[in-house]
Amino acid sequence: MTQPTRASIEALVRIAAAAAAEKKATDVMALDVGQTIVVTDFFLIATGSNDRQVHAIADAIEDALREAGAKPIGSEGEAELKWVLLDYGDFVVHVFQASEREFYRLEKLWSDAPRLDLPAEVANVTAAPAVEDAPEEVS
């Protein structure tokens, strides 16, 4: 069995991100945590608005990745549907409801990790700019 290349791992992360976007996931981001932790290379993080959407996003990601030849080696959270984790070894998918994502704040915890560029239509960012990032008003 050959080791996957970085390019093949990135391609799978992008497939998962696109599948999440197709199910209207918001604030989709991929963090390159491979230099920081040894257990995986990427975290893909996405938000669903309720239990049903979190389930639909997670299912769509699993289906798209299965079609690409990848199967999760583990999963958690399907019963509660507040935070579903899909472990693919080289990358881990986290699908949150907004309140859980805000509580755990993985992107803040791993803020030093570089982000994998995703198209705007896939990232589907909904957050308003922080006060310190907002443009200054001109009088």
Image (cartoon, rainbow, N blue to C red):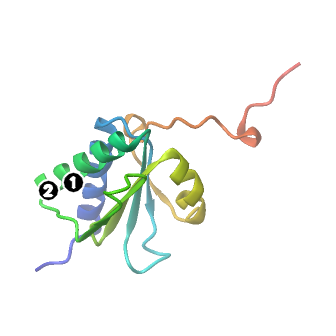
Residue that badge 1 annotates: 62
**Is residue 109 left or right of 12 when viewed as pictured?**
right
**Quadrant of residue 119 within the rendered picture:** top left
Asked if labels 2 and 1 touch by Cβ distance under 8 angstroms, the answer is yes
Residue that badge 2 annotates: 66
- Compared with residue 20, is residue 101 higher up or lower down, i.e. above or below? below
- Compared with residue 37, is residue 72 higher up or lower down, i.e. above or below? above
> Looking at the figure, which quarter contains the C terminus?
top right
Residue 104 percent location from the top left of the image: 56, 60
Q: Which residue extends farthest top?
A: 139
Q: Residue placed at 30% from the left, 45% from the top?
A: 57
Q: Neighbour class for label 1 at 10 Å: few (<14), some, many (≥20)?
A: many
Which sits in the foreground, 114 or 72? 72
**Is residue 124 left or right of 73 when viewed as pictured?**
right
Residue kind at label 1, given as amino acid type? Glu
Q: How many marks?
A: 2
Q: Residue placed at 37% from the left, 52% from the top?
A: 81
Distance from the alpha carbon under mark 1 to that under mark 2:
6 Å
- Compared with residue 70, is residue 131 higher up or lower down, i.e. above or below? above
Which sits in the foreground, 9 or 63? 63
**Is residue 108 left or right of 135 when viewed as pictured?**
left
Q: Residue placed at 22% from the left, 66% from the top?
A: 72
Residue 14 percent location from the top left of the image: 30, 51
Residue 92 percent location from the top left of the image: 35, 64
